Amino acid sequence: MTKTETAFEIVKVGFEQFVATTARHNGLVYGLVTAFMALMTGWMASIVFRKD
């Protein structure tokens, strides 16, 4: 069995770059916004899938 190592660089652009940079530089804000989005998504799902 042979192994081959290949080096490659992953470059983020656009919105993905913005999110990655924000997460690195403003961790608290990123965490709060992410938690808020999760809560809002759960709340909206409970409204959409409500059984009346």
Image (tube, grey):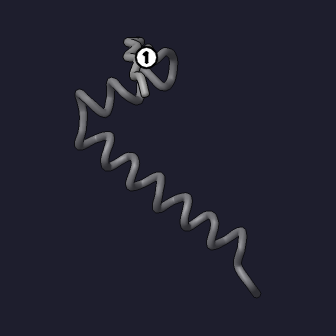
Above or below: residue 46 compared with residue 17: below
Q: Is residue 5 or residue 49 the one in the foreground?
A: 5
The quarter of the picture where the N terminus appears is: top left
Residue 14, position as x, y percentages in the image:
51, 17
The residue located at (54%, 65%) in the rendering is 42
Residue 15, position as x, y percentages in the image:
50, 23
Q: Which residue type does callout 1 highlight?
A: Ile
The quarter of the picture where the C terminus appears is: bottom right
Residue 31, position as x, y percentages in the image:
31, 47
The residue located at (43%, 21%) in the rendering is 17
Q: Quadrant of residue 43?
A: bottom right
Give the tally of numbered discs.
Answer: 1
| Residue 35 appears left or right of 38 | left
Residue 19, position as x, y percentages in the image:
41, 29
| Residue 45 appears left or right of 13 | right
Structural crowding at the residue carrying mark 1, measured as other residues with C-alpha within 10 Å and reported as few (<14), some (14–19) or many (≥20): few
Q: Quadrant of residue 26?
A: top left
At mark 1, the secondary structure is: loop
Residue lying farthest to the right in this orientation: 52
Residue lying farthest to the front in this orientation: 1
Q: Is residue 31 or residue 9 the one in the foreground?
A: 9
What residue sits right under mark 1 in the picture?
10
Above or below: residue 42 compared with residue 9: below
